[in-house]
Image (cartoon, helix red, strand yellow):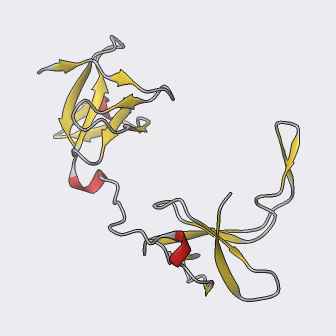
Amino acid sequence: MALTQLQVNSERQYICPTCGKTLRKVEGGALSIVNGKVDMNATLPKHICDDCGVFYREILRTGYFDVFDLPENERQKKPTRVISTGDIPPTILKRESDGKCPCPRCGERMDFVEAGPVQIVNGKPDFSNTMDHFKCPYCKSVFRKIVGTNYFQWYDK
């Protein structure tokens, strides 16, 4: 067991010592039973590097982390190809039965966000969620409806 002390970037997030990318933090879950024994490690947070296929778990709040192989089913899928935003024409997007639709930019499944009331953020009105739109969790694209049409267009916040 080789322990590693992880470096922190300017946003105070851990970075992978192998590839240098930001680690994704996943909070611990419920207790689980493995081979008839209680697995307490499932309750501890993980810092995951999807590119390297490993996760880091802190040992007794010492600031040192142990590295483990990440199971294939826990890896976050990355889009293989992302189209430039200038190459995306206005397009008609329709929700399917699960409330999602394919993203025109990366091809993954986008979530539909229903319109809501104006919210106050830091003392200022925020109108960003006052219209129905689609949001892609993979390529972080937002597609807003063009007023008076059935077409959606990529939107830059």
Rendering coords of residue 23 (x, y %): 37, 37
Q: How many marks?
A: 0
Q: Is residue 33 above or below residue 51?
A: above
Q: Is residue 94 above or below residue 105?
A: below
Rendering coords of residue 34 (x, y %): 21, 40
Q: Is residue 102 visible?
A: no
Which of 106/119 is in front? 106
Rendering coords of residue 41 (x, y %): 29, 30
> In the orientation shown, which residue stands out farthest toward the top?
62
Q: Is residue 88 above or below residue 16?
A: below
Quadrant for the N terminus in the image: top left
Answer with left or right where residue 133 lies relative to residue 72: right
Task: Determine the residue positioned at 44% across, 72% down.
Answer: 83
Task: Determine the residue positioned at 81% across, 81% down.
Answer: 147
Q: Is residue 50 visible?
A: yes
Task: Determine the residue positioned at 51% across, 29% down.
Answer: 11
Answer with left or right where residue 122 lies relative to residue 132: right
Quadrant for the C terminus in the image: bottom right
> In the orientation shown, which residue stands out farthest toward the front?
86
Task: Determine the residue positioned at 53% across, 65% down.
Answer: 136
Which of 32/58 is in front? 58
Q: Based on the displayed image, in which of its 4 quarters is residue 61 positioned?
A: top left
Rendering coords of residue 44 (x, y %): 37, 29
